[in-house]
Image (cartoon, rainbow, N blue to C red):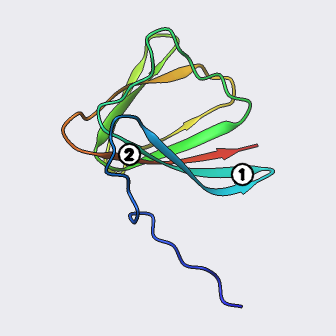
Amino acid sequence: MPPEIANLFSALSSDHSAEVITTLLDHPSLRIERIVSLGQSSPEDFWYDQEDHEWVIVLKGKGAIEYADGRIVELSEGDYVDIPAHQKHRVAYTDPDSETLWLAIHYK
């Protein structure tokens, strides 16, 4: 049986009232997510503190990640960052005028 082919850019939601996270691959040591944002950000008092490392790339649009120490890393198309496990971070902003498409790879 041939492998099933999917397209990262297909079936993007037209509902932008909330960020849309789609799990593309889920394995015990690896999870790949497609995230579509339009102006969303993390709540002011919220920090991700994840068990796994996270490598994230912006494929379309722009956004920023804020770390608990106050650093803000702005990302635009093609920019990526590797976030170690338990590195507290949050999404500071995403472009409110056009979709931001992220690919997040969570790994052990």
Q: Nearer the viewer, residue 6 or 67?
A: 6
Rendered location of residue 58, percent (x, y):
39, 47
Name the quadrant of the N terminus.
bottom right
Which residue is at the far left?
97
Label 1 vs 2, first from the N-terminus: 1
Q: Which element type, helix, strand or loop, lies under badge 2?
A: loop
Eyeballing the image, is 38 above or below 8? Answer: above
- Number of other residues with Cα within 10 Å of mark 2, as a class: few under 14, some 14 to 19, many 20 or more: few
Q: Nearer the viewer, residue 29 or 70?
A: 29
Rendered location of residue 75, percent (x, y):
35, 37
Question: Nearer the viewer's eye, disc 1 or disc 2?
Answer: 1
Q: Amino acid at mark 1?
A: Leu
Q: Measuring 25% from the left and 35% from the top, which residue is drawn there?
A: 95
Q: Amino acid at mark 2?
A: Asp
Marker disc for residue 79: 2
Marker disc for residue 56: none
- Measure how far apart labels 1 and 2 are at the Cα level: 21 Å
User: Is residue 74 something one can see in this rendering?
Assistant: no
**Quadrant in the picture for residue 53:** top right
Eyeballing the image, is 105 above or below 48? Answer: below
User: Is residue 14 something one can see in this rendering?
Assistant: yes
Rendered location of residue 66, percent (x, y):
44, 20
Marker disc for residue 30: 1
Name the quadrant of the C terminus.
top right
Left or right of residue 51: residue 13? left
Rendered location of residue 91, percent (x, y):
43, 26
Q: Measuring 22% from the left and 44% from the top, which residue is drawn there?
A: 98
